[in-house]
Amino acid sequence: MSEVIEVRSPSNLKVIGTVKRMNKDEVRGEIEEAYKGFEIISKMPLYKRTSILRKVSEILDRERERLARLLAMEAGKPIKDARVEVLRASRLFRQAADEAAIVLEGKNYRVDAYEYPPGNENRIVISTREPLGVVTAILPFNFPINSFAHKVAPAIAVGNSVVVKPSINTPLSAIEMRKILIEAGLPESAVRVVTGYSSEIGDEIITHPLVSLITLTGSTQTGLSIASRAVSLGKRIIMELGGSDPIIVLEDANIDRASSIAVRARFEYAGQNCNAGKRIIVREEIVNKFTKAFYEKVKSLKIGDPLDETTDVGPVINMESVEKLSSVVEDAKIKGGKVDFVNKGPEGGYFFPLTVISNANLDMLALKTEVFGPVAPIVSVKSDEEAVSIANSTEYGLQSAIFTNDVNRALKISRELKFGAVIINDSTRLRWDSLPFGGFKKSGIGREGVRDTMLEMTENKLIAITLL
């Protein structure tokens, strides 16, 4: 059995690095080391922890280009998008530092407002927020740097230590992020990175008794399986899971704007975003005009080398993804869809053609499942009610978008949509890193976002003092 795992760039399949193939015993040791780190940083004054987080932000700004190039090679993310991801991570560490004091402020309760229990007029009751212990952070392949920041920065801010399990497709970024945290002054035991196959080490990072909370960004199937096991062991969970986000385009929408945003929302990072606009629902009055505009904009995208400054779309992450996407396309053909490979990428690597399915229907996998790649089904509807029905027809409820010039109409529709966010006249891809992010139904459990994550990663403790 090989002791290392090769990391290959999805754009050209060349080996760009190796990581250790850890076993359960090694992972157990890393978790035990992380608990030692928790004992150190949980006692560290808040100003010291926030100073470290601000220093991380400074180093990320300094190392932005190097990390962006690594991200482009490792994840296949176009370099211009990779730079944005590193910038977001930098700002996120800074936001965690700025907001920690607010989240950890605690509260003074006026218990003299309550008759029971007797004697409340002689009591002072306060609450404090305390860290949980060791947090396991399971990262996705598509945002290996920003997801690291979303999970690690809040954990460190409130005094937890973290064991990070990156995707086997993109582990190099997590290793570099840990180095930056250590350079910024974080004790080495407070953040650990474990690498290996989930089938071999996944059980340990979920079930180990020293792990208090598991935060995961990944598929719904994986997340719900982990969640059920974690909860049965009394562990906290934050699950940011799958999505099949609808874009509803009404007949009074600005077609040029709606089509431009829809193309970006669907095909950014080859469609491999949880809040990508994965289903496009268009009123029949404008569906032909919209589809024509959509096609033209898809044709104008450049598919190619992620390190090329002019590339808009890179490869998908691996061959498994290519095969899944091919099955979705074949299913659409069988079920009456008109499939067009509108824009094809270069040979070599895991490039998948930018694909549009017109005449899509609810029997197709393209509308029933989460399609993690550059396939865009367009559905024609006769009414707003039908649009809402189709939008709500999946088990997912992450984000959604409505395009219309009638805000009142959009607000009425938004009340019927079962999603964690409804974006009016903009992209499903909108996310504010400090605001709650998560979904209804099987799109998640709990919410991410700097403040929400800190609250999830702390215990609320009441302290009551009876005055003698």
Image (cartoon, grey):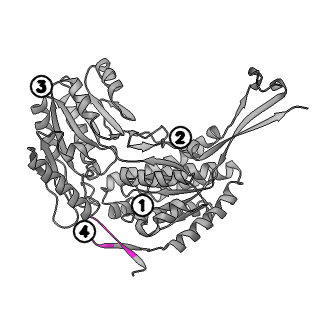
Q: Callout 4: 10 Å neighbours few (<14), some, many (20+)?
A: some
- Contact flag, marks 4 and 1 (Cβ < 8 Å): no
Query: Which tag, 1 or 3, sits closer to the chain's start?
Result: 1
- On residue 285, which mark appears? 3
Residue 377 position by quadrant: top left
* Distance CA(mark 4)–CA(mark 2): 39 Å
Residue 336 is covered by the magenta coloring? no
Identify the residue shown where x is 53% and y is 57%. 136
Query: Which tag, 4 or 1, sits closer to the chain's start?
Result: 4
Residue 383 position by quadrant: top left
Q: Position of residue 444 (x, y in %)?
A: 42, 44
- On residue 452, which mark appears? 2
Q: Nearer the viewer, residue 237 or 318?
A: 237
In the rendered structure, which amino acid carries the disc numbered 3? Answer: Glu
In the rendered structure, which amino acid carries the disc numbered 4? Answer: Asn
- On residue 12, which mark appears? 4
In the rendered structure, which amino acid carries the disc numbered 1? Answer: Leu
* Distance CA(mark 3)–CA(mark 4): 43 Å
- On residue 207, which mark appears? none
Q: Secondary structure at mark 1?
A: helix
Residue 402 position by quadrant: top left
* Distance CA(mark 2)–CA(mark 3): 42 Å
The residue pinned by badge 1 equals 67
Query: Mark 1, mark 3: which one is toward the viewer?
Result: 3
Query: Which tag, 1 or 2, sits closer to the chain's start?
Result: 1
Residue 8 is covered by the magenta coloring? yes
* Distance CA(mark 1)–CA(mark 3): 46 Å
Q: Position of residue 349 (x, y in %)?
A: 22, 66
Query: Which tag, 2 or 3, sits closer to the chain's start?
Result: 3
* Distance CA(mark 4)–CA(mark 1): 19 Å
